[in-house]
Image (spheres, coloured by chain):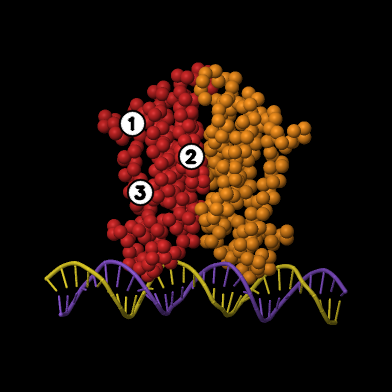
Chain colours: A red, B orange, C yellow, D purple
DNA sequence: AATACAGGTAAACGAACGGTTACTTAGAGG
DNA sequence: CCTCTAAGTAACCGTTCGTTTACCTGTATT
């Protein structure tokens, strides 16, 4: 992709993330780049095509990012489709890496904000939002926690419930980080939370019938 | 407020909540009510005035709702500004009532969705969103938990951290409820969470150095 | 019966929207 | 040197935006 085409994408995403798709105009996208809106149509055939191109790029980046930072299940050649030997520390590191990605990576952060603004306009956007940022991660973590519970690495409890309680602060802190801009504090709170979570749900330190 | 004026407010809010303030047009607001957009100006002097009226009404309703359902601190005449004798069960009931309010009450649910869509457009909306739905409730709960910890009704831990872990699933489930529409299931998950929370942070059942 | 007015309509306003067109221009390749 | 093309501009298209205006029409008051 040419430099200009790429910079149009980024400028458009930044406006979509702040104002929403409809409220961001082709003129404002072009204006931010120091060109006129007519020039945009040399690179994309419509406003919608820019949007579609953003979504396509996010899919590519997300796939790439998952390949690099996924919890080990994909790195165990012996049993690639099983969740084996995943430790609490693996999950914690993965969580912190994901938080940094969704807040520090400009493309990811803007894409997330854009989805936040578009989620009520169409079922497709709602589904995308859920699978990227809400229900999706919860059920992904539930699978991991189920496996950990089965090997006794996590206290016995409903894995979906555990996943929700583990993930929810991540989700809340994303929004707080957006509004306050205090990334350090949010990440610290998140790490404190994940540490507490595995401490409190460690089957070796839990003796009673707490869950 | 006249019936027409009120119904304009509700119709406008419903559109603001789905499309955002900018993307919702005066024509669509009027059309949904079976009148022409010119008639809207007999009741409100501008589109912005409708929006301001919505915010003002939300402030009134929220104040009223807080007065009715607040955690007991306001009902103790002897010490109105102190958090005394608040039990875990009080907090759990308050939480469930708040969840039902923010999902079942049409005005509150639409207002919350509207703020979600407007939060990145102005600092004022971001502040309103935070104080109503995110940081606000967390610090409110932190105050309550601090008092409970001091009287030994809650395990010793950073009250802000406790509040975040308690509130975050509430926040996540609001969004999931919006997208899936499965209010029963979300409320059940929330109640399961609040029960687990107070069970795991009960100083009488916690014996070790878990927090 | 005459008057005032609240609440509606239809049409128009200038501005901005997404998109198109005709034209210019700088540079690459033969 | 000529030609082709990619990338830009300015002006315009039809539509819709928020807002204003002139007009109508029941209903209540005097």
2 or 3: mark nearer the eye:
2
1 or 2: mark nearer the eye:
2
B118 over A161 or under it: above or below: below
* Residue A102 in view, yes or no: yes
Inter-mark Cα distance, 3 to 1: 24 Å
- Counting the numbered discs, the total is 3
> Which label was assigned to residue B55?
none
Q: Residue at x 30, y 59 (%)?
A: A3
Give residue A202's quadrant in the image: top left
Callout 2: chain: A
Among the two numbered marks 3 and 1 on one chain, the one whose residue lies closer to the N terminus: 3
Residue identified by numbered label 3: A59
Element on which disc 2 rests:
helix
Callout 3: chain: A
Residue C23: horizontal and vertical position, in percent? 32, 80
Residue B75: horizontal and vertical position, in percent? 74, 36
Residue identified by numbered label 2: A186
Residue count near mark 3 (Cα–Cα under 10 Å), binned few <14, some 14–19, many ≥20: few
Q: Residue at x 45, y 57 (%)?
A: A16
Q: Residue at x 35, y 45 (%)?
A: A62
B146 over A109 or under it: above or below: above
């Amino acid at each position: 992709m040419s430099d200009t085409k790429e910079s149009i994408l980024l400028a458009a995403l930044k406006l979509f993330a702040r104002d929403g798709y409809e409220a961001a105009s082709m003129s404002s996208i072009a204006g931010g780049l120091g060109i006129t809106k007519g020039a945009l149509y040399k690179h994309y055939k419509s406003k919608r095509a820019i949007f579609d191109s953003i979504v396509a790029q996010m899919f590519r980046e997300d796939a790439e990012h998952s390949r690099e930072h996924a919890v080990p299940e994909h790195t165990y050649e012996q049993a690639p489709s099983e969740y084996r030997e995943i430790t609490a520390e693996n999950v914690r590191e993965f969580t912190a890496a994901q938080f940094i990605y969704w807040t520090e990576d400009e493309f990811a952060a803007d894409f997330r904000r854009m989805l936040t603004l578009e989620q009520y306009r169409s079922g497709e956007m709602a589904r995308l939002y859920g699978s990227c940022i809400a229900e999706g991660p919860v059920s992904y973590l539930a699978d991991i926690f189920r496996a950990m519970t089965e090997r006794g690495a996590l206290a016995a409890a409903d894995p979906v419930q555990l996943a929700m309680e583990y993930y929810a602060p991540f989700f809340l802190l994303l929004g707080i980080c957006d509004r306050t801009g205090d990334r350090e504090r949010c990440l610290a709170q998140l790490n404190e939370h994940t540490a507490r979570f595995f401490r409190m749900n460690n089957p070796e330190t839990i003796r009673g019938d707490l869950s």
